[in-house]
């Protein structure tokens, strides 16, 4: 069953199917799929893909939806050595067109893709049975370092990049994450995050890696429904991005605390979370592991911090997630910086990609085996890492490197709901660059002169924005990251 030595994840699923075949692996509404059923359906869909002409190394575009069929296809592709290109079918047409033209898929599975250049099959309605059935496929001899998935970045600093992740990469990330968070076969996890992004897909892999139960939830929009699922399914953990926490806090207040006794862990990631919210979560969930990760699609879950254990370092992004992961602060030549000195944060380990899909994207992406994150920061003498900002977004004010996040935090602290700061050419031609602040319009906001005066009391002169502009919205990615470079276009 699931003869796939190249895929540690499939080997784990096969092991669970033998050791506890009747244990529930996957829940969607009233549907319950056991580990034995999961393994058999992965094999059946693999036979379907093979009958459709999909071969080892071929790329299939998988339009991610929160449905059991996605899981079957995702792992079936791995079984035969095909490469999953996971996308959000609701993404902008330009993004989807770029991805499709870049990867040249032989098959598209899912709905919402118009003008497809290859066969397109919906996931719903079990289209696999007609061809796949119980037919077996001949096991493929595939290397563990072969590409399993191609995930495209959000493109905060330009065109999205195709990140090639091997079978060993995705299994390594799941193993590192589970080791830190403590997820076990006894856990029941609610997954409300989108599967088209690294965070949600990573949670799916973590759960099946250890033989736990995954409950598929549409999203967090209907909190009453989400809370009902937490109660009905006796959920012990879930993942969320900071924007979701802000929504839960605003809509439900402290009502989520009724689950504090049953929730063993919550994983948080993909964007920054204010320190005051970390303290609030600690208060609401005194016995829950509150784990926040740092990482990129290229280096998933590179570092972790647990709020209760590192209460005095809540402004840190933590330490490497496992002994198999290393981090280092480097200069532009790849030389290590001393503790406390800012530089570029670089990581290496079992979960780090070895290459982008397009060779040109690899230019300046690595220092040897070290992946250059593009994040600026430093490490303290105890091995904890701190972010200063994105290297490409740092503002060079007369030779002084200024973090836009520092300015944004100061502006928001005086009563501005949302803002973004970028570096622009100094109109006086003196300093090279100066900070420019974009402020989101909102009711009951201070007058601009008041904002300027208060911010000037909080920041050194070279960090105070020289230019200010009111805007209707601040551009962000789906996970809440500010797209600062869009403001400079």
Image (cartoon, grey):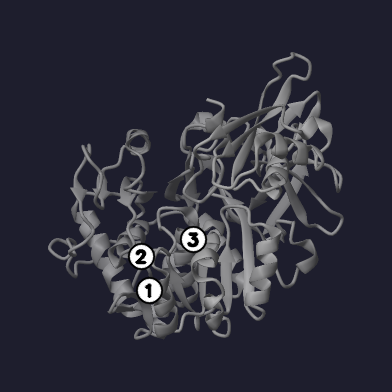
**Residue 202 - label:** 3
Q: Residue furthest left?
A: 130
Q: Is residue 460 left or right of residue 270?
A: right
Q: Is residue 18 left or right of residue 41?
A: right
Q: CA distance from mark 1 to mark 3?
A: 23 Å
Check the image and report above or below for 408 versus 302. above
Viewer-side label of 1, 3: 1
Q: How many marks?
A: 3
Q: Are marks 2 and 1 in contact (CB under 8 Å)?
A: yes
Element under disc 2: loop
Image position, residue 229 (x, y; %):
40, 78
Q: Earlier in the sequence, mark 2 or mark 1?
A: 2
Q: Nearer the viewer, residue 162 or 218?
A: 218
Q: CA distance from mark 2 to mark 3?
A: 17 Å
Image position, residue 149 (x, y; %):
42, 50
Residue corresponding to mark 1: 225
Element under disc 3: helix
Q: Nearer the viewer, residue 313 or 68?
A: 313
Q: Residue furthest top?
A: 429
Q: Quadrant of residue 230?
A: bottom left
**Residue 218 - label:** 2
Badge 3: few (under 14), some or many (20 or more) residues near its Cα, within 10 Å?
some
């Amino acid at each position: 069953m699931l003869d796939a030595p190249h895929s540690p994840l499939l080997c784990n699923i096969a092991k669970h199917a033998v050791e506890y075949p009747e244990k529930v692996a996957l829940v969607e509404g009233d549907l319950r799929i056991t580990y034995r059923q999961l393994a058999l359906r992965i094999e059946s869909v693999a036979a379907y893909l093979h009958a459709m002409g999909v071969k080892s190394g071929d790329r299939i575009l998988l339009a991610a939806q929160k449905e059991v069929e996605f899981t079957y296809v995702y792992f079936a592709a791995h079984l035969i050595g095909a490469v999953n290109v996971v996308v959000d079918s609701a993404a902008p047409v330009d993004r989807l067109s770029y991805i499709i033209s870049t990867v040249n898929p032989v098959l598209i599975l899912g709905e919402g893709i118009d003008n497809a250049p290859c066969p397109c099959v919906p996931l719903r309605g079990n289209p696999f049975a007609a061809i796949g059935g119980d037919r077996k496929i001949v096991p493929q001899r595939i290397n563990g370092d072969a590409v399993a998935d191609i995930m495209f970045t959000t493109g905060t600093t330009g065109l999205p990049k195709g990140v090639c992740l091997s079978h060993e990469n995705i299994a390594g990330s799941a193993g590192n994450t589970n080791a830190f968070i403590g997820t076990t076969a006894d856990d029941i996890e609610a997954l409300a995050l989108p599967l088209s992004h690294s965070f949600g897909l990573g949670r799916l892999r973590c759960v099946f890696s250890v033989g736990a139960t995954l409950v598929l939830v549409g999203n967090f929009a209907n909190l009453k429904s989400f809370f009902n699922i937490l109660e009905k399914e006796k959920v012990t953990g879930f993942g969320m991005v900071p924007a979701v926490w802000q929504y839960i806090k605003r809509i439900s207040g402290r009502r989520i605390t009724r689950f504090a006794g049953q929730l063993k862990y919550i994983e948080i990631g993909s964007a920054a979370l204010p320190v005051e919210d970390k303290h609030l979560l600690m208060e609401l969930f005194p016995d829950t592991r509150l784990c926040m990760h740092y990482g990129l699609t290229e280096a998933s879950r590179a570092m972790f911090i647990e709020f209760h254990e590192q209460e005095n370092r809540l402004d840190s992004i933590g330490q490497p997630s496992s002994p198999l992961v290393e981090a280092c602060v480097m200069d532009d030549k790849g030389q290590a910086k001393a503790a406390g000195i800012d530089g570029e944060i670089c990581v290496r380990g079992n979960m780090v990609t070895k290459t982008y899909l397009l060779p040109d994207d690899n230019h300046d992406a690595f220092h040897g085996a070290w992946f250059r994150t593009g994040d600026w920061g430093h490490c303290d003498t105890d091995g904890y890492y701190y972010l200063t900002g994105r290297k490409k977004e740092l503002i060079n004010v007369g030779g002084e490197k200024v973090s836009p996040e520092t300015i944004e935090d100061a502006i928001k602290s005086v009563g501005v709901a949302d803002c973004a700061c970028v570096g622009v050419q100094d109109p006086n031609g003196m300093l090279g660059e100066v900070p420019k602040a974009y402020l989101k319009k909102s009711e009951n906001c201070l007058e601009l002169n008041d904002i300027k005066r208060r911010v000037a009391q909080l920041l050194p002169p070279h960090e105070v924005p020289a230019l200010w502009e009111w805007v209707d919205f601040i551009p962000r990615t789906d996970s809440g990251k500010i797209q600062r470079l869009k403001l400079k276009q």
